[in-house]
Image (cartoon, rainbow, N blue to C red):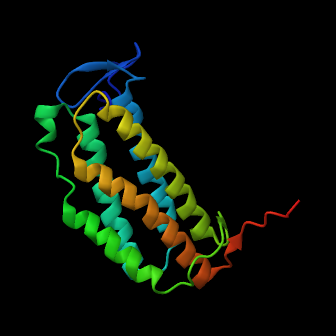
Amino acid sequence: MGKSVVYTKTGDGGKTSLVGGTRVPKTHIRLEAYGTVDELNSFVGLLVREVKDETLLNDLAFIQHKLFSVGGYLASEEDVSKNIPSITESDVTRLEDEMDRLDGLIPKLNRFVLPGGSEAAARAHICRTICRRAERRIYDVSSEYPIDEQIFKFVNRLSDFFFVLARYECVTNGTEIFWDKSCC
């Protein structure tokens, strides 16, 4: 039996390599950023299991592929990142257009929404909160390394997309739960 290609043992000392070869600590801001993007992508995969609408499933597949590109970009040194598929203005516009479509199908928001209401909505809210954390981590990276402006826009719109998707899922397949300031 041959050796596994899954483990390399090169990270046992607390360091790993960026795409391009530079060794960095596993606590490096780039790893925190692309690890959070990877976590988000995993939760999007979990969300996919609950969404039934074919258009939304196509949107979520698009998002997963784009998140993989964002993670690859964050994991790569500047000269290598040019080989990673970029996030474009049309990618951002696609999210905005889909949010506008969904927003037209749900009641206007006049109260604060609590996460939950249906399985898909709860998962979309988890995606929204992880996406916000990923955005913060990407801004951390930008304090030391240049980041493509479209990545900031895409990740910012993406958290909004998950919020609208959660509301849509509640309205179509559950019940929206609103914050009651006099509760409890």
Tell me if residue 34 can be seen: no
Q: Residue furthest bottom?
A: 105
Q: Residue furthest right?
A: 184
Tell me if residue 39 can be seen: yes
Instruction: Residue 45 in the image: state x and y as whole percent.
Output: 45, 59
From what the image shows, is residue 37 above or below residue 49?
above
Q: Nearer the viewer, residue 130 or 89?
A: 89
Q: Nearer the viewer, residue 114 or 3?
A: 114
Q: Quadrant of the N terminus?
A: top left
Residue at (43, 66) in percent of width and height: 161
Q: Nearer the viewer, residue 110 or 32?
A: 110
Residue at (24, 53) in percent of width and height: 150
Residue at (23, 48) in percent of width and height: 149
Residue at (33, 33) in percent of width and height: 141
How many numbered discs? Answer: 0
Is residue 18 rendered to the left or right of residue 82?
A: right
Instruction: Residue 43 in the image: state x and y as whole percent.
Output: 49, 55
From what the image shows, is residue 59 above or below residue 85?
below
Q: Residue furthest top?
A: 13
Q: Quadrant of residue 93?
A: bottom left
From what the image shows, is residue 163 above or below residue 37?
below
Is residue 84 rendered to the left or right of residue 36?
A: left
Q: Quadrant of the C terminus?
A: bottom right
From what the image shows, is residue 5 above or below residue 67?
above
Q: Quadrant of residue 182?
A: bottom right
Instruction: Residue 137 in the image: state x and y as whole percent.
Output: 41, 38
Q: Quadrant of residue 61?
A: bottom left
Instruction: Residue 168 in the image: state x and y as whole percent.
Output: 53, 78
